[in-house]
Image (tube, rainbow, N blue to C red):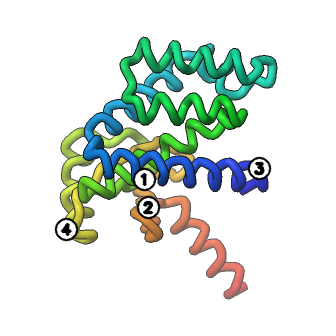
């Protein structure tokens, strides 16, 4: 991880913790979940919004006015609107995507869920995804949500990351292990 990314993640984690704690104190977790989902969708769907978050061409006042207008239009809670204004005033809107990721993790943890990152050579069917989620739930003791990515370079099998654990059953890793074994022999 680059130093800049580490700093951004650290700043985002502090803001996310503060927002989560405020929402929990105010018994406003549901509103926070809705706001996080709406902001994530806005970031994913709008290149203009992403530019607003990262461009140095906009000054504090312009960013502040823009995020307040966006927050009002989206119907965001007061807590999230205030945090967006604070981020704009401090010229830290660039950490918003990281902050949303941390908030999603905290909200999932609050619901007793955990996300498993699954990499497969081709897209899993709905039945395969459900079976994998059920199996992983039995292993970790929590409800598991699958976040799937496709990487054809693994040839076949799966790479599953749950928390700090990783299970690699990909054909590519088995071929690499076999290749290393062959080098040791020869």
Residue closest to the far bottom: 185
Between the residue at mark 4 and the residue at mark 2, the CA separation in whole angstroms equals 15 Å
Give the CA separation, mark 1 to mark 2. Answer: 5 Å
For marks 1 and 3 on the same chain, the one whose residue lies earlier in the sequence: 3
Is disc 2 surrounded by few (<14), some (14 to 19) or many (20+) residues within 10 Å? some
Mark 4 or mark 3, earlier in chain: 3
User: Is 45 rendered above or below residue 90?
Assistant: above
Secondary structure under the numbered disc 4 in the rendered image: helix
The disc label shown at residue 138, or none:
4
Residue identified by numbered label 3 = 4
Residue 50 in the image, given as x and y percentages of width and height: 62, 23
Residue occupying the point 64% across, 72% down: 179
Give left or right: position of 176 versus 104.
right
Circle 2: element type = strand
**Nearest to N terminus: mark 4 or mark 2:** 4
Which residue does the image show at 52% across and 68% down from the upper left?
174
The residue where tag 1 is placed is 117
| Residue 57 percent location from the top left of the image | 80, 18
Q: Which residue is mark 2?
A: 161
Q: Dot 1 lies on which element?
A: strand
N-terminal label among 2 and 3: 3
- Circles 2 and 3: CB atoms closer than 8 Å: no
CA separation in Å, label 4 and label 1 = 16 Å
Neighbour tally class for label 4: few under 14, some 14-19, many 20 plus, Cα within 10 Å: few
Label 1 and label 3: CA atoms lie apart by: 24 Å
Q: Nearer the viewer, residue 184 or 158?
A: 158
Q: CA distance from mark 4 to mark 3?
A: 38 Å
Which quadrant of the rendered structure holds the N terminus? bottom right
Mark 1 crowdedness (10 Å alpha carbons): few <14, some 14-19, many ≥20: some
């Amino acid at each position: 991880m680059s130093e800049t990314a580490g700093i951004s993640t650290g700043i985002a984690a502090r803001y996310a913790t503060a927002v989560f704690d405020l929402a929990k104190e105010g018994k406003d977790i549901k509103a926070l979940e809705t706001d996080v989902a709406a902001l994530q969708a806005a970031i994913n769907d709008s290149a203009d919004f992403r530019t607003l978050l990262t461009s140095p061409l906009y000054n504090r006042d312009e960013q502040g006015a823009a995020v307040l207008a966006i927050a009002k239009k989206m119907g965001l809670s007061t807590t999230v609107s205030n945090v967006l204004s604070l981020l704009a005033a401090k010229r830290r809107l660039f950490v918003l995507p990281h902050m949303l990721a941390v908030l999603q993790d905290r909200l999932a943890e609050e619901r007793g869920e955990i996300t498993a990152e699954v990499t497969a050579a081709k897209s899993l069917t709905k039945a395969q995804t459900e079976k994998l989620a059920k199996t992983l739930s039995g292993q970790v003791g929590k409800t598991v949500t699958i976040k799937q990515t496709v990487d054809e370079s693994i040839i076949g099998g799966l790479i599953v990351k749950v928390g700090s654990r990783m299970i690699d059953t990909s054909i590519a890793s088995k071929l690499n292990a076999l290749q290393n074994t062959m080098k040791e022999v020869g």
